[in-house]
Image (cartoon, helix red, strand yellow):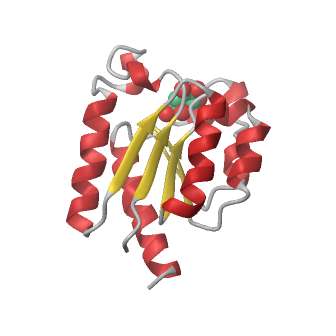
Amino acid sequence: MTKPIYVLSGPNLNLLGVREPEIYGRETLDDVHARCAARAATLGASVVCRQTNHEGVLIDWVQEARTEASALVLNPAAFGHTSVALLDALKMLSIPIVECHLSNPAARESFRRTTYVSLAATGVISGFGARSYELAVEAAYGLASKSKP
Ligand code: DQA
């Protein structure tokens, strides 16, 4: 696998560690990205990790992933519940898409139960805290290896 796995995170995840730690944990996003890089390295893969608070920027990166990534791990954060534009961008990808959440949105407020991104995702991993990302990288690697041996 020559292309990296893109690991993209949406709004407010830059404040991981201080943001509602009882829900999202005390690890920072840098810690989470380090976990992803370490997991990828054990698989012989690499990751490109980015975060933005801006919907358009996230869409630009999803479009970039279309040609530059072997797979996409995406924590859309709140945009997952609101953005049809993000869903439309994801629908143009032919690489595996693993939606990832630190918390389990299905067990929270009712407005978190609809996630547009899930309509385009190959699979969803949620509720394992920072480990969700590691598991998502592993799943993305497995799917990408299967689709392009
Ligand atoms: C989240 C869950 C979303 O509902 C929320 O808006 C987030 C984070 C998670 O990782 O658990 O910002 O995606």
Q: Is residue 44 toward the left or the right of residue 66 in the image?
A: left
Check the image and name the residue furthest to the bottom: 149
Seen from the viewer's position, the closer of residues 100 and 107 is 100
The answer to whether 108 is drawn above or below residue 69 in the figure is above
**Who's the residue at 73% across and 46% down the image?**
87
The answer to whether 93 is drawn above or below residue 23 in the figure is below
The answer to whether 79 is drawn above or below residue 60 in the figure is above
**Who's the residue at 39% across and 56% down the image?**
137
The answer to whether 135 is drawn above or below residue 148 in the figure is above
Q: Quadrant of residue 112?
A: top right
Quadrant of the drawing holding the C terminus: bottom left
Residue 88 x/y as whole percent: 77, 48
> Ligand 1 is in which quadrant of the figure?
top right
**Who's the residue at 25% across and 69% down the image?**
44
Q: Is residue 49 toward the left or the right of residue 111 in the image?
A: left
Q: Is residue 3 toward the left or the right of residue 38 in the image?
A: right
Tally the numbered discs. Answer: 0
Seen from the viewer's position, the closer of residues 32 and 106 is 32
Residue 3 x/y as whole percent: 41, 66
Q: Quadrant of residue 131?
A: top left
Residue 44 visible in this rendered orientation of the protein: yes
**Who's the residue at 67% across and 49% down the image?**
118
Residue 103 visible in this rendered orientation of the protein: no
Q: Is residue 23 toward the left or the right of residue 18 in the image?
A: right
Q: Quadrant of residue 1?
A: bottom left
